[in-house]
Every structure is written in structure tokens, then in C-alpha cells.
Amino acid sequence: MTSSTLPPESRRSSAPQPRASWVQERADLDRTTLRPRRDRLGHEPPPASPPGTLVIDDTRRPKIFVIDYDAEVVSEKEIERVDECIPYLTDDRPSITWVDVRGLGHKATFERLGEIFRVHPLALEDMVNVPQRPKADVYGGEHILIIARMAQVHERCVLRTEQLAILVGRTFVLTVQEEADWDVMEVVRERIRAGRGKIRERGADYLAYALLDAVVDGFFPVLERLGEHIEDLEIEVLDAKRRMSKPIHDLKRDLLTLRRAIWPQRDLVNALLREDNPLISKDTRLYLRDTYDHAVQLMDMVETYRELSSGLMDLHLSGISNRMNEIMKVLTIISTIFLPVTAIAGIYGMNFHHESSPFNMPELDWYYGYPFVWGLMLASVVGLLTYYRRKGWLRKDKDDDGA
């Protein structure tokens, strides 16, 4: 039996967007706005602040959703105030309660969350003050705090990352999302609603595993899109298109952002596997192994793509150098062709009076002197062109057709 009070439009989808022209869309976006690509310490407290200081400037209330379920029944509801989740946490039903907070705003709401869930002040600080390095911390054997990062390629080809905090208790999971408009956890919500798999038969630790696994698996479509982008860039670089430095640099920066997100998440999954914690059952640890394998696979893909992107930049710079060499080659050939012509014209342009001496340019008195000079010039040009052609200097290499 399933009950849901959420309107259909509030259920977010994490399906991948249709592929468009990456370079074109990115260029269009660059012309209109600056892209917030790098993590900035916008929610960090001032230096020497007391531990547990919350930095929340936004006064808007976050969206709060509650999913309470067991093997038979699931209830889903959007609540206005955080106190409305207390009945789900204190009822006598052996259910699992997932409280999903979307957005970081309204400081009083998060202070009240800390009181209801008895969150350690340091844990609450890490949940709210973003960005934090992905990690897993245990607080008194009652809570496990998992800090992860989600990634998505925006429909305008911009890589977006968002912090996700997962607080795991014995009968509840509290998630706090940095942004309210997207995530990668819709697949977990659908599994709970439809009762697929074992998620509604397991505890809160299995729900936390499912969320963490969805976060890690969410990087695969992002890397797939980046792989397609790398293929497009390879074609454009081989076609010797200009202004390719910025797209390649953006690609390398995106890959660095993904590396900074995936590398520590692999370490936190490994820590959950190795550390003995009563909140994580042995069966759940078996599933965490699969998540760890996925994180290792993602790291291999990121490192491979980083090497490819570095090769693209080298190939692009090599193409620029080849084009410059071709230009210099053409200019050098033109200069050498006109060098004897210039010398001949310079010689016969000297103001020697042939009347003074028979050795002062006697050919100036020749009947065919002027045609002879022109013939000498043409002969030097034809001779040099013939020589260059036999040497192969006038032929264009097939590998340089796009240069």
C-alpha cells in the first residue's frame, strides 16, 4: 500500500538531457554570462569563529520532504515546518523516515533540525557550511555523517556540482542538499514508491547506501557526456579549427572538478567498508563494495580523460605550430623567388654613365637590352620554382590538408 501527498510536478527527474552541440552551446553561454564553475567559500564562517558556527544568509525557507516507509506502507509528504516530521520519528511503527531538506536557507530551520535530530554542532556545521570535502564521520555511535558531492551536466553544457549531506541514524536518514532545483536521487525515491528491490525491507543504513550509490553512479552519465565532448573536440582539432584553446581548457577544468569530487568519495566509501560501526550492518557493507568498485572505475575514467584532454591541447598547439610553419614556408619561398629579381633590378638601377667607360653597363646600349633583363628575371624565377618543385617543397603534405 502506498500513499503520497506530493504533486507530480514536485517529483524531480534526474534523466539525462538530450545531447546538443557542446562547443556551440558553451560558447553561447560564455557570451551571455559568467559561469559559476569553481567552488567558493561562500558559506564558511569568519576566521577564529567558535566551532559549530552556522553561516546562512538566505532567509528563504528550504523545501522539506518526508518519506516514511516500511515493507507494506509508504507515506510521502511535503511539510512547511520542520516540526511536522516529529510524529514520523516518534511513532510506534517500525518504519524508516527519510527527511530531505532541499536548499540552504533560514537559519532557524537548521537550528531546529539540529535539536530534533540531536545533531552534533560540528556535524551541523559541516552540513550547512559548504563546500566541504567529501568524508564520513561518526558521532558517538549514534550518527554517521556522510558528505558527498553530486554532479550533473546542465542542459547548456555546464558542469554543476552540489554538496549532499547524509546523516544516518538508527531509524532515520536526514539529507541536506545545497540546491533545491536538482539532484540524482529520484531513482531512489521511485524504488521506495514502487517497492522495487529490498530497500523497503532494510534499515536506515541500506537507505544511506542507496543514496550514496545513486550519487556515485550519477557521475557515469556526466563522464559519458564528457567522453562525447572529447570525441567532438578531437574532430575539430584534427580539422585545425581555431579558437580551440578555451574549450579544451574548460574540459580540463571540468575533469579536475570531477576528480576533486570522486577521489575523496572513493576514500569515504572505503572508510565505511573498513571501520566497524554498529549503524552499518554486514549485509550493507557487502553492497558498499559495489559502490567502491564504481568509484574506482570512475577514477580510472577521469584519469584517462585527463590524459586525453592533455593530448588534445598538445595536438592543438602542434597544429598551430604547423600552420605557422606553413605560413613561414610560403613567405620564405616568395622571398627567395624575388631575391634574384631584386638583385638584378638593383644592379641595373645603379646610375653608372656608360659614356664614361666601356665597362659601365655596356648592355644598356644593346638593342635587346631591356628584353634581356626581363628574360633573365623570368629565367631566375622559373629556375627557382623548378628547383623547389623537384625538392618537393611546393607540395602540400596530405597530413596537413586542414592546416
Image (cartoon, rainbow, N blue to C red):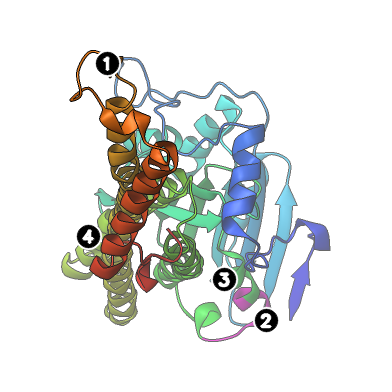
Tell whether 213 sits left or right of 11: left
Name the kind of residue labelled 4 in the image: Asp
Question: Do the CB atoms of the residues marked 4 and 3 lie less than 8 Å apart?
Answer: no
Question: Which residue sits at x=52%, y=24%?
Answer: 56
Q: Say what secondary structure mark 2 lies in.
A: helix
CA–CA distance between discs 4 and 3? 23 Å
Please state the extent of the stretch shown in magenta in the rendering: 191-197
Q: Position of residue 144 (x, y in %)?
A: 33, 54
Name the kind of residue labelled 1 in the image: Phe
Q: Is 22 or 86 nearer to us in this picture?
A: 22
Residue, disc 4: 267
Label drawn at residue 137: none
Mark 2 or mark 4, earlier in chain: 2
Name the kind of residue labelled 3 in the image: Val
The mark lying in front, picked from 4 and 3, is 4
CA–CA distance between discs 3 and 1? 98 Å
Q: Position of residue 153 (x, y in %)?
A: 55, 56
CA–CA distance between discs 1 and 4? 89 Å
The mark lying in front, picked from 1 and 2, is 1
Mark 2 or mark 3, earlier in chain: 3
Q: Position of residue 167 (x, y in %)?
A: 42, 52
142 in the magenta segment: no
Residue, disc 3: 188
Tell whether 382 sits left or right of 116: left
The mark lying in front, picked from 2 and 4, is 4
Residue 142: in sight, yes or no? no
Label drawn at residue 352: 1
Residue, disc 2: 194
Q: Position of residue 141 (x, y in %)?
A: 26, 54
Q: Residues within 10 Å of mark 3 (few under 14, many from 20)?
A: some
CA–CA distance between discs 1 and 2? 105 Å
Q: Quadrant of residue 223?
A: bottom left
